[in-house]
Amino acid sequence: MSSAQRFLCTLLAATLLLAALTGCRSSTSDEVSLTEDDNGASVTLNKGEVLAITLPARPTKGERWDPGDIAIYEQLPMGQEQFKPDSSLADYDGRQILRFEAKTRGVFDLHLIYRVVGGADEPIRTFDVTVTVE
């Protein structure tokens, strides 16, 4: 193999390695995750980071988590929401993941309510977190 071919192979290998490493770095590196164990906690985010809150849910019964006050969307816009089935959870179908983008600097009280959609206004459960965006 000539030195030019060796150089091209090395360059190709380095490019592929860089691409692989970049592919391994997902957007979740800028994501801060909370679970039901973090209820009542405080979290600090940098502007642009995403807060992902994973909570047990039962959508087959019409139950879901939603912000208690939609005005929070102005400071912490809601991103992609997901549901991941998990049969290991007693009394629930899986986990609902709510994402909020740290867009505006400040301190915000994020209040989530778990309720039956279209049912009584009284929440079944609540989740609260104080979010500081720097």
Image (cartoon, rainbow, N blue to C red):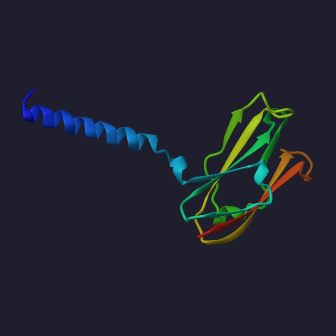
Left or right? Give the position of 98 relative to 2.
right
Q: Residue at x 61, y 51 (%)?
A: 79
Up-down: is 133 above or below 35?
A: below
Up-down: is 134 above or below 80?
A: below
Residue lying at the far bottom in this picture: please name it: 106
Give the position of the C terminus as an image quadrant: bottom right
Up-down: is 113 above or below 90?
A: below
Up-down: is 72 above or below 113?
A: below
Front one among 119 and 130? 130
Question: What is the x, y in percent for residue 129?
Answer: 75, 60
Q: Residue at x 81, y 36 (%)?
A: 58
Question: What is the x, y in percent for residue 7?
Answer: 14, 37
Q: Residue at x 53, y 54 (%)?
A: 30
Marker count (numbered): 0
Give the position of the N terminus as an image quadrant: top left
Front one among 104 and 42? 42
Q: Residue at x 74, y 60 (%)?
A: 70
Question: What is the x, y in percent for residue 49?
Answer: 56, 58
Question: What is the x, y in percent for residue 102?
Answer: 60, 62
